[in-house]
Structure formats: structure tokens, C-alpha cells
Image: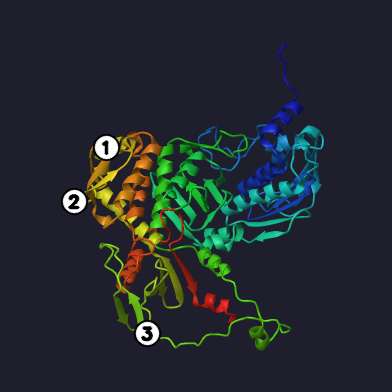
Amino acid sequence: MPIRQLPDDLVNRIAAGEVVERPASVVKELVENALDAGAARIIITTSGGGKSLIRIEDDGCGMDEADLVLSVERHATSKLQSDDLEDIRSLGFRGEALASIGSVSDLTLSSRPADAESGLRLEMKRGVAHGPYPFSMNKGTIIEVKNLFAAIPARLKFLKSDRAETGAITDVIKRLAMANPEVHFVLDGSDRTAVNWPAQSGPGALQARVAQVVGADFADNAVTLGASRHGIVVAGLAGLPTFTRANSLSQFYFVNGRSVRDKVLLGAVRGAYADFIFRDRFPAIALFVAIDPHEVDVNVHPAKAELRFRDQGAVRSAVYRAIQEALAAAGYKASSTVAEATLNAFQAPHAPNPSAPGPADQFSSGLAAPRDFAPAPQNWQVPTTPSFGGLNEPSARFETYQPIAEAPDYPLGAARAQMFENFIVAQSGDALVLIDQHAAHERLVYEKFKTQLAAGPVASQAQLIPIVIEMPEEDCDRLEAAAEFLEKLGLYIDRFGPGAIAVNETPALLGQADVTGLIKDLADGLAEWDTTAALSERLDAIIARMACHGSVRSGRQLRVDEMNALLRDMEATPHSGQCIHGRPTYVELKKSDIERLFGRR
């Protein structure tokens, strides 16, 4: 078959297949054009999920007759000041969008520059331009796209329902609005509930826009990102580790104002949160990266949804460090949604039914009468045990002390009691705080482990008599092969016959740990990781296992001073708001929340 030149109409339709994937793709291209034109207010109107109508109205710089006619030609753009494709400073530059859209729809462009007396209108039907004609309008540009893919039934039938396409358009506008908080966005149409996001300005503009678009919960439960590394500026909001989602729909990534989905950024965020959340949960984040345009290639995807960094390692490091530093600065802080979930878990007793039998009838039907009520003792009695470093031996000794009249001014308050031998009850100025002692201490030990390891080998303490642990020979082989590595963590072991391991020294900060459980747990981990070469990569997992076995256990009775010492350590330790498994370590209920439970508010 001989080679032939394709007609322009077919070329445009092929290009439309790359650029115009669905109605949301059209909206993205046209709104980006409005932003590049300097618009301060953009109104988006849709109908039928964008298949029947897409209307974009902006107050940007507008186009004169020459630009209006040229705008629908292929490979025509105002986005490149020179022919340098490595210096892209606008949101779009391919020069195919309007020509491609016009080839698969009925396209109408109306535009008026600020210095013109009236506007002009240009119409395109199936790729053929008509006009321009005089048109009365305000400064800016109005673009209407009707009957998208009407002439291409094969493409039309692959579109989703009107509701799904409407949702995709909303998601596109969300991302564009987040990247441009100084622009007023209005989203309207017969297929949706109207949305109005006024422009934001000042130092808190980004946070205010994120609260508008994503919701106040995210903004209230996020830390602010602000760091510069390797010439890369990282800004935005990162959700607290206890504020997670079941999917990645609450993750937004922007590079030089362009919304993207990039594996480098995804990997950096996943790594930064690896210590703090469950493996099947996703952090909420709005990440904005500013980088020299010469260091990023935005021309690797027709729809400009992907990009390529020249130095991926530098970008990954900058994002990782920015998130880590922000989360560390948050300290013990946990998300407010934890308290909300706790309140929802409480169920108030049902109100008595006026028609129900009275007390006499209730007692006669077999219900027991209330027992005598004994007044509370004047003094509290709290069982005591040795400190964290001592053995967890049962004790019948009691310490009597007077309740504290006023709670000291500590963020996590002062310990009042211990419940179920695992939960510390504390009172701050205006809140009740419940702390999971095992989860909290587990995080404290883990963070101390990392700090000591960064400074050198972890300090160890010798066992008076080596602890001999019998286990399968293959597990002993794995532990023996990893012995040199484990010494860096303060754990010294020797082979003790074919089926036993002798533990001579343990990490000092573990105190009286469950050494047998720790060794068997490490053996299981080595069997899972297969090779000792993977130990360095699994360092965090190994430390986590050791911290779990070295933390104060559930069922351990604590003295008041031990409970308060744990609270003070939490306040001084980064990331102590969640344990190493991603669970919250404490719940804070404000006085107003408790009053709500009893109908006082």
C-alpha cells in the first residue's frame, strides 16, 4: 500500500484521540487556557456530564481577530515565548487542543481584549471554521463545546454515565482550583449542584483554598509543608498520620502549578509515611513542588498528566524531608477525627417510654432492685509496681494520694487513673485524655532506637545469666548469620548447640523485655525476608519488632509518677500521636464534647 498524506480533518481527529479522552479532558484544556490568559474569575457550566454542553467563561486578556482565527489552527500557541521546549512556564503548549476539540464537537469561541470596543465570535462545526463575527460581550473569552463526540459514535459509547463524567469534571476543577487559590472558580450546570469558591489571598490562601475544595477536616488535621532543598521548593498540607483514607483520592500533586500523577512523588510520600500508617491506608496530602522548568520535562504525555524529572533522587529527597520535618514538628498531635469517632462510639441509654410499666411493675416482673450506693472514698488508691525498667511482678501494695485539685498546664494533662491495666486517664485544662500505654510507649522506644542508631551502635546491657532459647535449627542458622548486624542494634547472640540460641546482651533501652518473644519474632522476620542482605532495607521493621517487645505491656499496673512520666515523654517525642502500626496512641475529648454526650449542649 503506498504512503499518502492524511487530510487535516483526519489528522485533527487522531490528535483528538490523544488530547480529548473524555469531557473532563476538554474542561482541563480550556480552563488551563483561561488561567494562562490571566483570568481572575472562571465560570464552568456543564450539561449531560459535559457531553451536551461545556461552557467556560473567563475575564482574561482575550484575543483579537488575528489570534482568534489562529487559535483553532494546529500547532499554533501563545504559550511558548521561544522555541525552547525545555523552558515551559505555562500550563499548556501543544497547540492542538482547540483544533482537536473542534474536530469532534460543535465549538464556539467568543473573545474580546480589554482595549477592543466589542468582541468577536468564531464557530467550528466538525473541524470547519466560520467567522469571525462581531459579538457583544465583556472583556475575556467564552468557549462553548456542544455535542461532544456526536459524530463519532464509537467514542461516545465508551464514555461513562452522565454522573460519572460530571464527577470527573469536578475532580479536574478541584485540582485546578487548589493550584490557583487567587482565582475565583464557579462550577454550575443542570447536571450538578452549584459550587462557588471565591478567590483567596494572603499567607493563608493555600490552606483556605484547600479547606474550600477538600473540606475543613483536612485543613484542620494537616501540618503545613514549607521546605527548600536542592533548589526544589516543597509546600502544601500533609495530613496527620491518624488522618488517613481507604484510597488515594485525597492525594493531590502539583508541579509548577500543574496537577500530575508522578511515581517519584507517590513513592516519596509513601516512604515518608511508612513509619506511621497501616500498609492499606493512604495519607491525605496536597503537595506543591516548584522546580526550575529546565529540570522537568512536561511534554511526555499528550494530556500533560505525567512528567519526568531530570534528577529524580533530588526531588524524592526534597519531598521526603519536607514531610518528615513537618510531621516531626507536629510532635504528639493526633487528628481530631479520632475524638469524633470515639464520641460516635458512645451510645446514650434510650429515654424511658412513658407508656412502659412503672418501677413497681418492673420489679415485679423480675428486675432486681438497685443496690445500696456507697459514697466514694476520700482518697484514691492506686496499685503500684516497679518502674518501667523493673520486672512486671504482681504487687499487692497500694499508694494513697489526694486527687489533684487543678491539672497542671501540660498538653496531655496529668494522670488521674489507670483503667483495665492498659489505659491511662488524664485531665488537661479543658479535656479528658485517654492514653493507650502500650501503643504510646512502643512509639517512644522506637523513636529512641532510631536516635541512638543514628549516633552509632545502640547501647546494650549484659544479661547476668545468658538466656538460652530453643528453636528449630533453620531459625538458629538465620539468626547466627545475622548476628553481626544485630550487634549494631545492641543485641548480642551466640549459637548454643544445634537447636538453641544464647542471648548475652540486649538493647539497654528495652529494659526487661520479652527476650524469648523478641528472638522468635526476629527469626520469623528473617525467614520472611529470605536473605540477610535484606536486613539493611528492613531496618525499620526490625526496630519496630524490638520496640514492640520492649515497651510497657498491656496489663501492667503503673504508678502515678510512671503514668505522668509517660505523658511528658510523649509530649517531647515526635510522632508519638500514633504507634508504629498507625493506630492513635491517645484520644482527647474536650469538655464540650463530654457535655454533648449528656445533652448539655
Q: Earlier in the sequence, mark 1 or mark 2?
A: 2
Image quadrant of residue 325? bottom left
Per the rendering, the mark at residue 480 is 1
Q: Position of residue 190 (x, y in %)?
A: 79, 55
Colour scheme of the rendered structure: rainbow
Residue 537 visible = no
Work out whether 73 lies above or below 403: above
Q: Is residue 472 above or below residue 416?
A: above
Residue beneath the point at 71% across and 82% down: 356
Q: In this orientation, which residue lies closer to the viewer: 168 or 367? A: 367
Left or right: residue 114 compared with residue 596: right
Reading the image, the residue beneath label 3 is 405
Q: Nearer the viewer, residue 450 or 8?
A: 450
* Location of mark 2 (residue): 465
- Marks 2 and 1: in contact by CB < 8 Å? no
Question: Percent x, y for residue 241?
Answer: 47, 56
Report if residue 592 is visible in the image. Answer: yes
Residue 206 located left or right of residue 59: left
Where is residue 198, by image quadrant? Answer: bottom right
Q: Nearer the viewer, residue 383 or 158?
A: 383
Rendered-image quadrant of the N terminus: top right
Residue 56, x across and y down, in percent? 72, 49
Disc 2, SS: strand
Q: Say what amino acid the circle numbered 1 marks.
A: Glu
Q: Label 3 crowding class (10 Å Cα cut-off): few <14, some 14-19, many 20+?
A: few
Q: CA distance from mark 3 to mark 1?
A: 56 Å
**Marks 1/2: CA–CA distance:** 20 Å
Of the residues tagged 1 and 2, which is closer to the observer? 2
> Percent from the top left, x then y, of residue 100?
71, 35
Looking at the picture, tell me which residue is in the foreground, 547 or 217.
547
Q: CA distance from mark 3 to mark 2?
A: 47 Å
